[in-house]
Structure formats: structure tokens, C-alpha cells
Amino acid sequence: MKPHLLYGLAGLTLLAGCSEEKQPPNVIFIYADDLGIGDLSCYGATSIQTPNIDRLASEGLRFTNAYAAASVSTPSRYCLLTGQYPWRRNNTGIARGNSGMIIDTNQYTLADVFKDAGYATAVVGKWHLGLGGEDGPDWNNIISSGPQNLGFDYNFIIPATVDRVPCVFVEQDRVYNYDADDPIYVDYDKKIGDLPTGKDNLELLKLKSSHGHNQTIINGIGRIGYMTGGKSAIWVDENIADTLISKSQQFILKNKDNPFSLYLCPHDIHVPRPPHPRFAGKSIMGARGDVILQLDYTVGKIIEILDSLDITENTIIIFSSDNGGVVDDGYQDMSVELLGTHKPSGIYRGGKYSAFEAGTKVPLIIKWATAIKSGTQDALFSQVDFIASLANLANITLPEEACPDSQNHLSNILGYTSEDRDYVIQQNQWRVLSVIEGKWKYIPKSFAWKYDAQTNIELGHDTVPQLYNLETDPGETTNVAIEHPEIIERLSAIIK
């Protein structure tokens, strides 16, 4: 059993500089999906405008040197919630839609921090950390292990990704809108049932695949994996954002008079990207641009309800992404053809899946009107440190051996200091580790293939060590490893 430390509110109130009668701040963590650091107008994008996210940036602290733990979803989310680097576990690769739960129920999580501090806790949106026991969930019964076992009082989740089956929501420990007369079965190894597939029934597709995504067709879109049953439970892709907004608003409204923590994980801007009709064609960049607008709308609706309840000033809003951006990630949605001059990765090299900067360098904005002055934070920061930092804010002592890689950098979050983390460790999809220390970025020698042919992204692989001076060469264009063997030796020792 995990220890639950039922104290902390007074310490958090004092750290906030508030009177003891003042309610501790609510905390909302909005974790976007596949959003590049160049995708927001507050980070320099000019082909698209994101006014609601820009409002957070103008009223809060905008980080310029923040990193996710990995360049793909599952390991980044694992690290954020547990404070443990994902490469310490063997099962933290990109999870299938029917994977068993990856986080052990005895692990201490970010949700536990807030639960121990007396908060109501919830996760709404993309989960992608597995459900059920080792063999995965039974979609037709109570799901034995899930967010409810990891400190979340309430959960309404997309089990994996929207391009993976099953295409259903889970609320608490059951499939949402489940019909016992239409049982759900999922398989990732062989075809099951008689539903058409993207491979054999191209005429039924409203969105064609560019690579992969040619198995069971749901709502006219080919998915990864095979599914049968569950017709009443299947989501409508165009309505997913609205559904997640509604569930988040309901949780906020229910808990407006008490401190609450909401981990909101929009599906946007991951593939597939069929936007709600409100946003279809509203950008100049095709579907990917349209769902960036949809993501911004989601942020705006969360701000709107906070404003309407007069609790905005006493709410910490954290906005970030799980990894870098990607344009063609499996569907022919015109995002490549209509990209124009927009650069999802900004000045950085690579993208999702990559060991280069654009794989893990992400937008990070933190707003707390009563305690954080607006401005820019240039400190080297890693998402692995959120759990230790927010535990310190809440005056919660982490259990011994919990969150082993998380460090307390609350002073950076609050903008009191701009001291760099000693170093940051990241991994790409193939678990190639890299390290940043000060101005230096080191990627050990790994594989010969340098490009992912399907996404056209540089993976950061090479058969020789790579060393880049990020201060003078943030785009990682010049490998200076040969010139600095002593730096290579030091950074190699950190990884070892």
C-alpha cells in the first residue's frame, strides 16, 4: 500500500504568501499531445494564432528551456506522473491500446501528492499508460487497475491514443456508454470480427492512411489494431475535444469550493485530426492547423469557467506538451501540403521520435496570478521535476525511494530564480539517451539509420558520438565531439 500523508494545506498556503484562511490554490495541468515548441504564437509562430494560450503566457511564466523526458508519449507521461526516468523500466515504450497498466499501483504519483494535501483529484483525456493487470483490461467488466489506483478520485480517459483501438472512453473503472449486449473485443496481433479494415476497404475511408493505420475502420478512419463490438460506446472523433472540455468543467464546478487538481490531457494535436466543424478549414495549414485552434479553444474554455467562478487568481495553470511536433504521422490530412512556412519545431532540429532538440524541447507555461510574476524563464528545466517541486509547494514529504529522479525546483516554477538544473536526461523512441549540461548536448553513438522515412524526421542517430554547443548552435548543425574529448568523457559518465 502507498502511504498517504494527510497534511500539507497549511504549508502550501504559507508558501503562497497568503493568509492561513485563504484556500490553497487549485492546480490544473494541461498536457497537450505532439505539440511542437514552434506551434504557438507566443513562441513565435506567425502562420497561426493561439490567443488563449498566449494569454497564459502573457499573464504567467513562459519557459524557453524546458524538456519532456522522452520524444514519444507513454514514457513522457510515465515520467511526469512518477518522477522516475522511463528508461529505468522495461515496459515504458509506446503502449498498445490493450496494454496492462504500466505504473505499479504501489508507485507514488503526482496525483498522490495532491490527494495527500487534501485535494480532489481528476484525470480527463488521454491516458496511454495501460489499464488492468499484466494481460491488459477486460473491456466488458470492471477494469481492475487504472487511474483510480494511482491517486485520482475521478477519471474520464481515452485509454491509449485516438488512432488506436478501442475507440471508447473509460469512466472510473468501466467503458463509458457500455452495452452488455454488444461486448468489446480488441486484438493487436490478428484480425477479429467482421468490421472492415483500412487495408481491404479503402472505399469506406473518409481519411486515408499515409503509413500504418490500416486496420479496423472506426468512423471512416483506419486505426492501429483490431476491434469488434461496443457500437454504443464508440466516440465521435470530431466531438472528442468538446467531451473532454465538458467533463473537465463538470469536475471544476463540482469542486469549486474546495481545492482541486485536474490533469487534463487533450487529444489534440495527435493524429487522426478530424476537427470539430467549428474549426474545419479555419486555419491555413489544413487539419493540423485546425486542431491547434481547437486545442487553444480547449484552453480558453477552461479559463472561461475559472473566470466565471471567480477562482482564476487562485488557480495554478500549467500548460505543456508530452513531446515535440510531427506533421505526417500516418494520415493523408493535407498537413504536409499546407504547412507553408510554419515550423512546428521552430529553430530546432528533429521532431517527435528524435534525440535532437525538437524531440523533447517543449512549450511550458505556468500561470498563478497571486504568486508568479509574468515574464520569461530561461532556466534548464525537466518535467521529471514537477512531482518533487509541487510536493514541496504542498508541504508534502515524498515517501522514501519514491520519485527517485525528481528534484525540487519550485523556485524556478515560481520564477524566484533561474538556476539551471545540473543536467537533463532525455530519450528518443529507441531509448537512445542524451544529456544536456549547461550549454552542451551529448548524444552517444547508436544506430546507422538517421531518418524515419515515414515521418521524414531526423532521429538523432549516428555511429559516432555527437556533441553540440547549444549556446552558439541551438539547431545542432555542427558536431564538435572530436574537439572536446574531455566533455564527452564527463557527459558519458553522467549517462552511465
Image: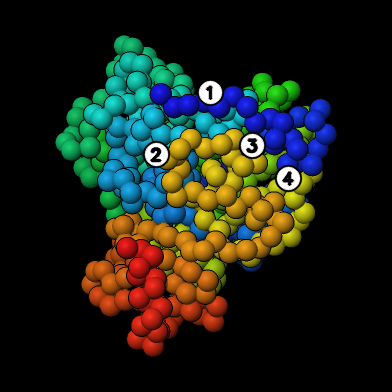
Residue at image coords 41%, 34%: 107
Residue at image coords 52%, 37%: 398
Q: Give the residue at mark 1.
A: 153
Relative vertical location of residue 375 with respect to residue 301 in this rendering, above or below: below
Q: CA distance from mark 4 to mark 3?
A: 18 Å
Ranked by sequence position, the earlier of labels 1 and 2 is: 2
Q: Type of residue at label 2? A: His
Q: Nearer the viewer, residue 342 or 391?
A: 391
Q: Type of residue at label 3? A: Asn
Q: CA distance from mark 1 to mark 2?
A: 18 Å
Ranked by sequence position, the earlier of labels 4 and 1 is: 1
Residue at image coords 22%, 32%: 187
**Residue that protrudes farthest toward the bottom in the picture:** 483
Q: Nearer the viewer, residue 448 or 235?
A: 448
Quadrant of residue 227 within the rendered picture? top left
For residue 389, say whether it is visible. Answer: yes
Q: Give the residue at mark 4.
A: 368
Ranked by sequence position, the earlier of labels 3 and 2 is: 2
Relative vertical location of residue 306 with respect to residue 50 in this rendering, above or below: above
Judged by depth in the image, the label closer to the viewer, 4 or 3, is 3
The picture places residue 160, in percent across and down from the top left corner, at 38, 37
All told, the count of numbered labels is 4
Q: Are marks 1 and 2 in contact (CB under 8 Å)?
A: no
Left or right for 346, reference 163: right
Q: Give the residue at mark 3.
A: 395
Q: CA distance from mark 3 to mark 2?
A: 30 Å
The picture places residue 410, in percent across and down from the top left corner, at 63, 50
Q: CA distance from mark 3 to mark 1?
A: 21 Å
Q: Give the residue at mark 2.
A: 128
